[in-house]
Amino acid sequence: MDEQKEQDRIRRRAYEIWEREGSPEGRAEEFWEQAIASISAEDAQGVTTSNAAADGPERPESTSK
């Protein structure tokens, strides 16, 4: 993955964490580090989240026909 794409991925993840934590001010570095750790752990497990993160939360499958 090129450097720009990796930085964008970290930026998106840090933003997600920031929102989840209630959008506090002054904790950008903390969220950035959490994003790096989260992505590193996923990469180590072979998990890719580029599509999942872009699509948002998973939707339950419809059982109606």
Image (cartoon, grey):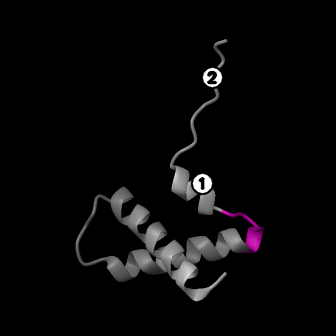
Rendered-image quadrant of the N terminus: bottom right
Q: Earlier in the sequence, mark 2 or mark 1?
A: 1
Label 1 SS: helix
Direction bottom: furthest residue: 3
The residue located at (62%, 22%) in the rendering is 62
Question: What amino acid is labelled 1 in the image?
Answer: Ala
* Mark drawn on residue 62: 2
Residue 9 in percent (x, y) is at: 53, 73
Q: Is residue 52 above or below residue 61?
A: below
- Furthest toward the top, the residue is 65
In this rendering, the answer to whether 53 lies above or below 65 is below
Instruction: Tell me the element at label 2.
Output: loop
Residue at image position (44%, 74%) is 11
Report crowding for label 2: few under 14, some 14 to 19, many 20 or more residues within 10 A (C-alpha): few
| Location of residue 31 by image quarter | bottom left
Residue reaching furthest to the left: 25
- Contact (Cβ within 8 Å) of mark 2 with mark 1: no
Query: Residue 18 lies in what quarter of the image?
Result: bottom left
* Residue 33 is a magenta residue: no
User: Separation of disc 2 and disc 1 at Cα?
Assistant: 19 Å
Relative to 22, 55 lies left or right: right
User: Residue at image x 56%, y 78%?
Assistant: 5
Give the prevailing secondary structure in the magenta stretch. loop
Q: Quadrant of residue 32?
A: bottom left
* Segment tinted magenta in the rendering: 44-48
Which of the two residues, 41 or 60, is positioned nearer the viewer here? 60
Q: Position of residue 34 (x, y in %)?
A: 49, 74
**Residue at 53% in and 56% down:** 54
Quadrant of the snapshot with the C terminus: top right
Tell me where residue 16 appears, x and y as whole percent: 42, 62
- Which residue is tagged 1? 52
**Residue 30 image position (x, y, % from top left):** 39, 79
